[in-house]
Image (cartoon, helix red, strand yellow):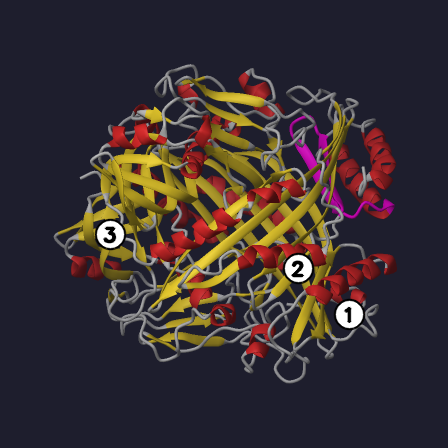
């Protein structure tokens, strides 16, 4: 493994030495390389990921975990970490193994691609950014177009005293084009984001047609009407469907919230929570998706976990501790935002599976209501079972037809009421996954993806 | 507060290897972090020391009438490591361009920033003991409570030696502490139904304040109980009162989007003197508020922080700059170049990100609206919005809003039943005559409080769009 290979022997020996003092020892090391360019016609800036190599050591003390993080994989740093862990184990010597299964996986994976990015350098990236920037010319009232193109290779190496060795190098490539329109001091914006795990081919999704359409949206939003307020039929675009799946069911199904007794979903496991046409999945192994991983940060392989199967809540996301506490198996969802942050149970790529309706059928079925488009974000309420999702724009639906453009709005509601009110899900032709990020609280930000097709239900919406 | 020792400070160690690379700047940090995580009242995990020491080099290279700015962060202090970081920065600078040729890095002569209280000495000397004491006080404050309990929590303390130097001779540094508190409080019994209510707090401070916990916990428990009891919001345009807890999610991002050098470069700032708010609104940017998370003697480029007027009685007054944007407009940095800003908040490590222009603490001058009760009386009928799920303002359009996590109906001039669910939102800043949040401020309270990164009293807004069940 490129950036970590020289340190693997020292890491292995450190784990082996410490394993003589505890029933279980593990280490996770990381390094990143990459480049991003930002160009808006006036200025150009480049940024490389920090040249940071680091590791977190985790030892079982008998009653809990002791963790030490270091920045640097040189022998002095490793000795510091070893010493700190040794001191923790002197105070709390462990005899029994930690709860939950320890990974014994042997994984060695690098993102496969026909068009690698490691030689995608400044000059070529800037040329592409300028090209994309020019695609907007001709759209009036566009005050600014900003193009960001980035690639990043995240390398992680996991070793433990149960003989697991998991090495992965994930390459994420993304293009973002943001447009700002302006008139009489009023501004509006829209943006196009395309990318995934892969090589340069991920940028082929950034098309002139898509860029032009986003610019037209930004311009049209200057004259958009206010969105309706109150309860109504809501038709969610794929990106908004994704936010809903992520915020409503994803966070609530992270089993550390079960263990904390902080999830409204826990008593509903095994019960019907929505119509048969609803299936929600978290899938860390989804090829090419933004949050694809080969294994999690406890060395458990990534997998497809069905959360809601044809309306029935059937599964949750687990790390080793929650799996042990709840009699389940780890699902490959233990993630750290970096080696300086603790691990949590986290989502990967969370989405609503396609149904069999067409967009036109859903508009007709809604009859009156609002279409929410261009998802901006959301926030969960795992305890109370509420959800908020925000959309940058939308359209009125009147008499079964799409009518006026409306400005940004928020959707609010009780998740279970929302799910029970679902009346249609569109087919695979509309399915999309986004390239976003997610935090646990305000911190611990991770690459994350959500998506789905169009979905029809009812909820409260209002200007936001 | 002590400056890092010259021979050891991260930035100074790197600077010794940059002779001949002028002009340059190095920002360094030596960080220790400690965390305690709670599952209910039980300690779930203790972490630390988490050690992170690193630096970011910025190089400035004139190119075709512009400035090429290249940067690289690293934690490798070896000569080879610094050389590699310099090479990366040089390569970026070769292709980058910023529309100025005027670079005015601070020299360190004259104003030094002086003393600003940002370091909790007890925490600095005894981090884990201090953290354990705080957690004990937190758990004690919940003891004996039956209607609301601690559902989870974390306390994370970060101790940082910041050092900054540049090729103009600046060598400065300071120590500072930050405490992040996350708490979930659950209220779970009552006739309103089976679903519990949660008050979820995310708070950042410069110091541990265990003595304040009994009063704060009582307030959080009351909020959690009100969330559980909360009924649906009404629908319509209503008078709304927004306390600092809500303003803190709106004002920093909107001010950064419209009242800074980058906004001016994009052509979206409002000309000084232009009315964008009610006469009652005066906003300051103040980087010297004692114990505020965004306070420091100097910004992350080494320019002293000061108090600046952003909006004076409703009219735009000053714009915030870092050194680069100041150069583009032939003015001076306002000490507003900060690293690690994300959605209006600050990450615990800063050297990994280049500087951007940001407000520090935004202070809304108290008005004559009186105490909260008097504002409520003035509203007569409407809504007090205590917490919005995520108001996510658009920095360009100023549109903000989200789900009402906790609110209260105002009926006949009194606080009435709690509200949970529904939406509230609008446009924060807009030209005079438009129905924006700031144009519609009808009263400003007289009692300010701090909600990171805003110091403000509650405000009464004439009318905001509320989406509810009926």
- Residue B240 position, x and y percent, is 24, 55
Which of the image's four quarters has the N terminus of chain A? top right
Q: Which residue is mark 3?
A: B465
Instruction: Identify the image quadrant of residue B125.
Output: bottom right
Helix, strand or loop at mark 1: loop
Question: Is there any visible trace of residue A262 in the rendered image?
Answer: no
Which chain letter matches label 2? A
- Residue A270 position, x and y percent, is 43, 14
Task: Classify residue A302 as left or right of residue B435.
Answer: right
Helix, strand or loop at mark 2: strand
Task: Classify residue B121 as left or right of residue B366.
Answer: right
- Residue B441 position, x and y percent, is 26, 65
Q: Which residue is mark 2?
A: A46
Q: Nearer the viewer, mark 3 or mark 2?
A: 2
Tell me the CA gap for discs 3 and 2.
41 Å
- Residue A275 position, x and y percent, is 34, 19
Q: Nearer the viewer, mark 3 or mark 1?
A: 3
Q: Nearer the viewer, mark 2 or mark 1?
A: 2
Tell me the CA gap for discs 2 and 1.
31 Å
Label at residue B6: 1
Tell me the CA gap for discs 3 and 1.
56 Å
Residues in magenta?
A53-75
Helix, strand or loop at mark 3: strand
């Amino acid at each position: 493994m490129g950036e970590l290979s020289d340190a693997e022997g020292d890491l292995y020996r450190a784990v082996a030495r410490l394993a003589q003092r505890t029933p279980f020892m593990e280490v996770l090391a990381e390094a990143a390389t990459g480049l991003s360019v930002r160009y808006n016609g006036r200025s150009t800036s480049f940024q490389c990921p920090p040249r940071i190599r680091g590791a977190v050591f985790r030892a079982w003390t008998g009653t809990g975990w002791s963790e030490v993080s270091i920045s640097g994989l040189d022998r002095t740093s490793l000795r510091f970490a070893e010493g700190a862990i040794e001191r923790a184990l002197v105070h709390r010597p462990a005899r029994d193994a930690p709860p939950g299964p320890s990974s014994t996986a042997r994984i060695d994976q690098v993102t496969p691609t026909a068009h690698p990015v490691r030689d995608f350098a400044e000059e070529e990236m800037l040329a592409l950014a300028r090209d994309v920037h020019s695609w907007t010319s001709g759209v009036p009232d566009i005050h600014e177009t900003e193009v960001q193109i980035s690639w990043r290779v995240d390398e992680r190496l996991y070793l433990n005293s149960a003989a697991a060795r998991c090495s992965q190098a994930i390459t994420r490539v993304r293009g973002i084009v943001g447009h700002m329109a302006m008139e009489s001091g009023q501004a509006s914006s829209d943006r196009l984001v395309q990318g995934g795990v892969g090589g340069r081919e991920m940028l082929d999704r950034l098309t002139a047609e898509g860029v032009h359409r986003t610019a037209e949206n930004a311009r049209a939003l200057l004259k958009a009407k206010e969105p309706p307020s109150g309860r109504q039929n809501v038709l969610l675009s794929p990106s908004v469907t994704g936010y809903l799946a992520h915020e409503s069911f994803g966070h609530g199904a992270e089993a550390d919230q079960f263990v904390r007794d902080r999830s409204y979903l826990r008593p509903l496991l095994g019960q019907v929570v929505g119509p048969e046409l609803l299936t929600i999945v978290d899938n860390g192994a989804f090829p090419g998706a933004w949050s694809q991983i080969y294994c999690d940060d406890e060395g458990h392989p990534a997998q497809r976990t069905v959360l809601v199967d044809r309306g029935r809540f059937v599964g949750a996301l687990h790390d080793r501790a929650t799996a042990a506490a709840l009699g389940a198996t780890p699902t490959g969802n233990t993630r750290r935002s970096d080696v300086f942050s603790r691990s949590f149970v986290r989502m990967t790529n969370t989405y609503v599976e396609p149904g069999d309706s067409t967009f036109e059928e859903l508009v007709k079925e809604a009859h009156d209501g609002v279409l929410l488009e261009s998802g901006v974000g959301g926030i969960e309420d795992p305890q109370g079972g509420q959800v908020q999702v925000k959309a940058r724009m939308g359209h009125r639906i009147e008499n079964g037809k799409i009518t006026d453009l409306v400005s940004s709005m928020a959707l609010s509601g009780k998740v279970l009421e929302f799910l029970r009110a679902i009346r249609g899900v569109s087919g695979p032709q509309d399915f999309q996954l986004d390239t976003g990020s997610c935090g646990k609280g305000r911190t611990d930000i991770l690459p994350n993806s959500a998506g789905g097709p169009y979905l029809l239900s009812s909820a409260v919406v209002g200007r936001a | 507060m002590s400056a890092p020792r010259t021979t050891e400070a991260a930035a100074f160690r790197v600077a010794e290897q940059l002779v001949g690379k002028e002009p340059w700047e190095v920002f360094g940090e030596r960080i220790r972090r400690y965390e305690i995580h709670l599952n209910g009242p039980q300690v779930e995990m203790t972490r630390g020391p988490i050690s992170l020491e690193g630096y970011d080099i910025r190089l400035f290279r004139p190119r075709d009438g512009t400035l090429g700015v290249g940067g690289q962060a690293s934690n490798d202090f070896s000569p080879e490591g610094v050389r590699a970081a310099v090479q990366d920065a040089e390569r970026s600078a070769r292709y980058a361009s910023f529309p100025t040729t005027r670079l005015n890095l601070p020299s360190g002569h004259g104003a030094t920033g002086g003393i600003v209280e940002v370091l909790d000495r007890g925490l600095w000397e005894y981090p884990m003991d201090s953290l354990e004491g705080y957690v004990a006080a937190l758990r004690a404050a919940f003891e004996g409570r039956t209607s609301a309990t601690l559902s989870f929590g974390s306390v994370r303390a970060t101790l940082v030696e910041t050092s900054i130097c540049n090729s103009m001779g600046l060598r400065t540094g300071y120590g500072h502490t930050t405490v992040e508190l996350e708490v979930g409080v659950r209220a779970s019994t009552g006739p309103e139904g089976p679903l519990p209510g949660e008050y979820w707090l995310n708070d950042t401070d410069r110091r541990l304040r265990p003595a304040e916990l009994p009063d704060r916990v009582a307030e959080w428990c009351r909020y959690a109980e009100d969330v559980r009891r909360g009924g649906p919001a009404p629908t319509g345009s209503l008078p709304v009162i927004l306390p600092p807890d809500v303003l803190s999610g709106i004002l920093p991002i909107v001010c950064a989007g419209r009242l800074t050098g980058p906004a001016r470069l994009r052509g979206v700032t409002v000309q000084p003197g232009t009315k964008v708010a009610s006469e009652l609104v005066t906003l300051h940017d103040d980087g010297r508020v004692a114990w505020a998370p965004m306070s420091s003697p100097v910004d992350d480029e080494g320019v002293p922080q000061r108090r600046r007027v952003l909006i004076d009685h409703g009219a735009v007054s000053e714009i915030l700059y870092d050194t680069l944007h100041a150069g583009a407009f032939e003015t001076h940095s306002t000490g507003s170049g900060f690293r690690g800003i994300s959605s209006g908040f600050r990450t615990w490590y800063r050297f990994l990100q280049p500087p951007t222009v940001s407000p520090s603490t935004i202070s809304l001058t108290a008005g004559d609206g009186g105490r909260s009760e008097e504002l409520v009386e003035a509203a007569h009928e409407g809504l007090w919005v205590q917490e919005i799920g995520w108001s996510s303002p658009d920095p360009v359009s100023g549109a903000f809003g989200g789900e009402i996590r906790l609110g209260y109906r105002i009926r006949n001039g009194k606080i009435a039943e709690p509200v949970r669910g529904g939406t509230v939102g609008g446009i924060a800043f807009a030209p005079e005559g438009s129905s924006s949040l700031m144009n519609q401020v009808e009263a400003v309270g007289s009692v300010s409080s701090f909600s990171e990164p805003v110091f403000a009293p509650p405000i009464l807004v004439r009318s905001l769009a509320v989406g509810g069940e009926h």
